[in-house]
Amino acid sequence: MIKEQILSFIDKINFFNDDILSTQNLNHGNRSESQKETNFSTKILSLISNKSNFCSAEFLNQIKLQLEKLNPLFEDIPTQNMFIQGKKPIEFQQLTEQKMNEINEHVKHLIQLQKNVNYQTEMQSSQFIKDIQKIISNQNYILTEALMVEEFDN
């Protein structure tokens, strides 16, 4: 019973002073549209919602709602030096889903190559790679035979 009361009191504690937040909202309510579009919350949301993160729409909506609530706390954080000088985010939104999946697979293989020394040997000795090598070998044999027949005919 006492434990429940304590937990109930803790739940009622407001860690953010609503008066401060509402005052800040009123003070900064006159910001221009271009400033609002480039605010910290918007930039953070664009980084989180990057296509390469594979975030669900539901998750992104929840993040957006929380960022909007906390936006007054973030307003003074400058965004002009957000990225390392000379670098900019990769524009994954311009890639198709198929290309994103291919990149994802490639990155998984690269990570495995770095983590596991035996991974490259395992991949090279896999049945899939052996089958590809057979196909290439057979095609090379067929091409060689075709060239020999052509030379013989001439």
Image: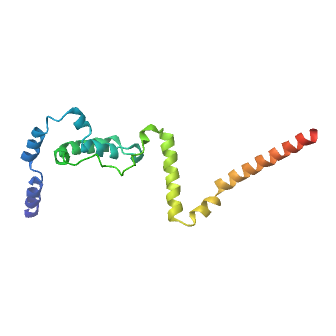
Residue 124: % across, % down = 64, 59
Task: Tell me the residue at 53%/65% (across/down).
Answer: 116
> Relative to residue 125, is residue 142 drawn left or right?
right
> Relative to residue 110, is residue 89 drawn left or right?
left
Identify the image quadrant of the N terminus. bottom left
| Image coloring type | rainbow
User: Can you say whether 85 is above or below 118 in the image?
Assistant: above
Q: Nearer the viewer, residue 69 or 10?
A: 69
Task: Tell me the residue at 52%/57% (across/down).
Answer: 110
Residue 72: % across, % down = 16, 45
Task: Tell me the residue at 76%/46% (across/down).
Answer: 139
> Relative to residue 26, is residue 70 drawn left or right?
right
Identify the image quadrant of the C terminus. top right
Of all residues, the one furthest to the bottom in this rendering is 117
Task: Tell me the residue at 17%/36% (across/down).
Answer: 31
Residue 126: % across, % down = 63, 58
Question: Which quadrant of the view contains residue 119?
Answer: bottom right
